[in-house]
Image (tube, grey):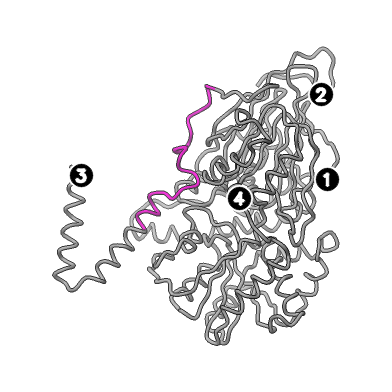
Amino acid sequence: MEDHPASGSRGRATPAEPVLRFHGAARAVTGSCYELEADGTRILIDCGLFQGSKAEKELNYRAFPFDPNGIDAVLLTHAHIDHSGLLPKLTKEGFAGSIFATRATQDLCSVMLPDSAYIQSTEVAHLNRRNKRRGRRTVVPIYDGADVAHCLGRFLTIALGDWFTVTGGIRARYWNAGHLLGSASIEIECPAPGDRPLRLLFSGDIGPEHKLLQADPSAPAGFDYVICESTYGDRDREGATEADRRRMLREAVDAAMDPAGALLIPSFAVERTQELLVDLQILIESGELPPIPVIIDSPLASRATNVFARHAKALDNGEVLSRALGSPNIRFTESAEESKALDNLKGFHIVIAASGMCEAGRIRHRLRNWLWRPQATVLFVGFQAQGTLGRILRDGAPTVRIQGDEIIVRAKIQAIDLYSGHADGPELREWVSERCPVAAGVFLVHGEVEAIDGMRERLKGVIPAERIVIPQLDAAFRLTERAALPVSSAPDARIDPAQPGHRDWHNDVSGLLLDINERLEAAAGDKARDVLIRKLRRALRDGDG
């Protein structure tokens, strides 16, 4: 990259048009990472972990589609792992710039990123034991605790609403996104041809109205480009008030009550768990629920809750959270032994455990212990990405595989959408409308295809159709004053652009094996099973031909 004069120097060359690249959360909801090249420098907005199908998660282990040494700075919207989870890998592989974030985001990352490293180390150790038994090669974690410590040393704290220089001639300021403690939308001004800088706004994740712990999102108006999340672009939550949410939670708890049962709530350890604690505390204090034992089975949730407690004065309903933390019927498990002991707990109780999509963490152990029991209820309170165990359960799978074991699903599966940290379609439309005029274009990201298509429809009458862009993974666009132009020299996508946000062959094979076992068990006898097995073998041979 050529040297460039310092910001503010006289007689500098006319800057080239900025280029924006989409390295994650393109037609999918995880792996958020956008690269902005402007004024001879390159910055990232987020650097998140891919989740969902194995095809997507494998991207976490592959090389970045850019040189980490060539990145000058990172702007982090918030602490969720799908936005921050590859930052330690970035610094491990040579990034030496600053990571700008709000104070609360930095505090949350200080507990979330070490937890991510721990989960990787334990899962890789388990996988390597299996691989050795099968004669397969072993793997190493994406990063470890030392890499996380090095990464956290690169954070710089930013206050909401204050302009700051990012690098070169690029400056930015943060606005409350209303999604999570410390979450932000990021306004960026960068040099461009013409007599003024180009103005961009990255939404980050936008919170809904009636968010329990966060104020409503805010940002200015008048941009050249808006990069907008679309997680629930096709969803319209009717009656999404605090009273409705608590009523639905109370009804779910009432329906789940069984003297020999349990209510399992897969939950994101950060914000969602704390919101559930507040609502349960309000329902218990009001007498609408009895003082049911509530166990938070997540070391990360415990540490994250301490961060929330430190920021309680800045939170809506922070005082209720403080009371909940002192309630005798609410307790946290720390050690693995305490967690395992929950399998022997008698009487109805509620367990809130991570991860929210059931892809990792202690919730998988709780599900393994309870899914086959009709006395149990599983309550989903957040988004479930395609290919995750949570999505498979929510879609009604009769059997699932957990840690290699086939488990029949007899537990009741329920869901409440009103705890989502994301705005729904009408709220996103209103948010975009309030950012207008948008002169050149809106990029729709961070959503599965159906959600993005729904969001595009909602923006009719707000943004001209020709100005709405739906990028694929690793697509690049030159940002002119009038329109976003595809860069023809963009590198080939790392995976099939149609793959993100969808089930992959790993999911299909698991489902096929479960279907085969079900048919074999339902067969009239061994003779019928032999016939079925011969048909399967014949199909495999014909497929080889």
Name the side, left or right, on which 491 lies relative to 288: left
Where is residue 173 shown, x and y percent of the image? 80, 39
Please give the range of residues in magenta: 488-510
Name the secondary structure under disc 4.
loop
Q: Position of residue 289 (x, y in %)?
A: 69, 81
Q: Is residue 46 above or below residue 104?
A: above
Name the amino acid type tagged 2.
Ser
Amino acid bearing label 4: Tyr
Label 2 and label 3: CA atoms lie apart by: 63 Å
**Which residue corresponds to mark 1?**
160
Q: CA distance from mark 1 to mark 3?
A: 60 Å
Which residue is rendered at x = 76% and y = 31% of the image? 167
Query: Callout 4: 10 Å neighbours few (<14), some, many (20+)?
Result: many
Q: Earlier in the sequence, mark 2 or mark 3?
A: 2
Question: Looking at the image, is mark 4 or mark 2 nearer the viewer?
Answer: 4
Disc 1 element: loop
Q: In percent of the image, x 53 and y 53: which residue is there?
A: 385
